[in-house]
Image (spheres, rainbow, N blue to C red):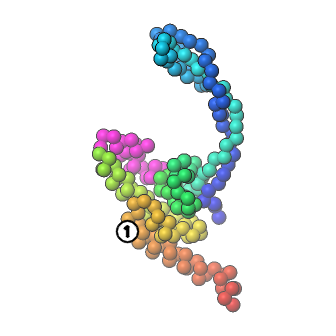
Amino acid sequence: MARLFTETTVKAKKVIEEREAFRMDKNEWYECESDQYIKIDDFTGQKIVMQEVCKEILITQIQFYCPLCKAHHDESDFLATAIENEKTRWLANMVTHYRHVHMNIWDEKWGAGGYGHQSSSQITYSIEKGNINNKSMQEIIKKATAFLTDHNITEYHFKTLQGSNRKTLDLASHLLNTSNEQSRKTNPQDIRKKA
């Protein structure tokens, strides 16, 4: 059975120092290399090419498992700190992933980052996002029922997500709580304990 989250260690570059490489006149043009950037001296107006001194470090990367594409994906940094419960956090990551990867409607209408809402009102964007999130949750419940029940993800975890509507909660209650009860009844270990 696949785990909800995995940790991997990857190499990354960390900037340990920034130093001035050279100065240019404000009209000069220079194409920076990958470890350089340009800043403007507030006093003289000169362009200063800054050089980043990096060192390679190891970082731990958390990824969540999607049972639909059978692959691991990077966890949201925001959700990692916003939601403590592991199952609810997995579900929130999965809803976001489903909205952007498995459901084309969202990105077509609002853009990959949801930035299409700038031409629309914030209220319209929030309502639409809530509707799409609930549609995503319902699809996840239908398409990944076995995975959800194997990991004991129930109506409770859907209820704790912001904006879950009655239709989503009813579906979760019907398919997940029923499936969990069925698996408990047919679990051989439970039968042995009773005997």
Where does the magenta region start and end? 99-120
Q: Point out residue 52 in the picture as x, y percentages from the top left corner.
A: 62, 25
Q: Nearer the viewer, residue 40 or 166?
A: 40
Type of amino acid under label 1: Arg
Q: Is residue 11 above or below residue 64?
A: above
Q: Nearer the viewer, residue 103 or 74?
A: 74
What is the quadrant of the C terminus in the image? Answer: bottom right
Query: Residue 131 occupies which quadrant of the picture?
Result: bottom left
Q: Secondary structure at mark 1?
A: helix
Left or right, 144 with reference to 169: right
Does residue 38 show up magenta in the picture? Answer: no
For the point 57% across and 60% down, the residue is 86
Q: Is residue 2 above or below residue 171?
A: above
For the point 36% across and 42% down, the residue is 116
For the point 37% across and 68% down, the residue is 166
Q: Residue furthest front?
A: 43
Q: Point out residue 53 in the picture as x, y percentages from the top left corner.
A: 66, 26
Classed neighbour count for the residue bearing mark 1: other residues with Cα under 10 Å, few (<14), some (14–19), many (≥20) = few
Left or right, 115 with reference to 72: left
Q: Is residue 149 shown to the viewer in this render?
A: yes
For the point 67% across and 43% down, the residue is 59
Which residue in the structure is indicated by mark 1? 166
